[in-house]
Image (spheres, grey):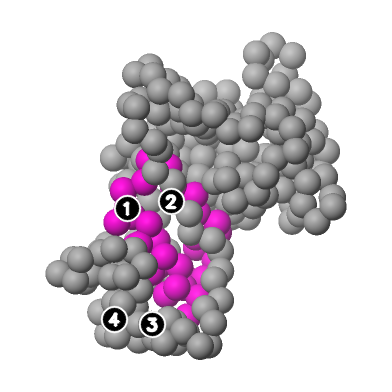
Amino acid sequence: MTTAEHSEDIENIVDCQNLSIHRDMREVLHNASCCIPINALTFIVGENGSGKTTLVQSILGLLPITNGEIKLNSKSKKELVFGYVPQSVNFSKHIQMTVSEYLKYSASVPSDLIEQTLSIVDFPETHLHNRLTELSGGQTQKLLLAAELFRSPDILFLDEPLSNVDDSSEKHIIDVILGIKNQGVAIVIITHDWQMVSSYADHVICLNTNFLCELSSSCICKNSLSKLNIRNIQKATPDPQSSHPGYCYIENI
């Protein structure tokens, strides 16, 4: 069940409580609890198949939950605006739409703002009239990110945002992410890039096949995060002092 609440004094924009989620007849998450803080950069990490994308898609309402509750919290009475950029999108070869047409008709970007919208994510102007099917994986990610940013989301989910971009674009994308976080947008990134996590994380949700745990900058040194890997997650144990069942602490890192 998903519920929405509003309050001027909130810490978390999303609260997931005791979630159980099935996918393809298999229970991917069982009794998992976690939160997404407001105005923070949250990373979701874990092994392949541990439920990272499933968790995000359930929060977005794209997948049903079997049990539990997802609470969406807003500082105002308006509904939260969600943004989502998947790791990859395969446009049908029958789609003849160009980049500029996609932004104009699918993302409602005015014609006079298309170039400005694309420049934010370092999308080359020379590809403005290319068909969507002609774009590389990195160019497609940039285009989708530009479209989502134009919608001014309250919370933005990014699935492996650096996986398909070249080195020259990587720093630019990171700067864009940090910039919109500083504007008050909650950012959630699914990643396998531990260097990125150790450098920029405010909050980390760790998933494996046994349980979910959370780390925040207030309870673990960012320098220690660089030592954290999937094997270390196995050493995590639930924190009995925490009122939130999703929290844990990491021992012997």
Relative horizontal placement of residue 150, taking residue 233 as reference (left or right): left
Q: Residue at x 38, y 57 (%)?
A: 148
The crowd level at tag 2 (other Cα within 10 Å; few <14, some 14-19, many 20+) is many
Residue highlighted by disc 4: 128
The amino acid on which the numbered mark 1 sits, given as a three-letter code, is Arg
Residue highlighted by disc 1: 151
Identify the secondary structure beneath mark 3: loop
The amino acid on which the numbered mark 3 sits, given as a three-letter code, is Met
Relative horizontal placement of residue 53, taking residue 30 as reference (left or right): left
Which residues make up the magenta segment? 136-165
The amino acid on which the numbered mark 4 sits, given as a three-letter code, is Leu
The crowd level at tag 3 (other Cα within 10 Å; few <14, some 14-19, many 20+) is some
Earlier in the chain: of badge 4 and badge 3, it is 3
Residue 83: give its label. Answer: 2
Residue 97: give its label. Answer: 3
Label 2 to label 3, Cα distance in Å?
A: 22 Å
Label 1 to label 2, Cα distance in Å?
A: 8 Å
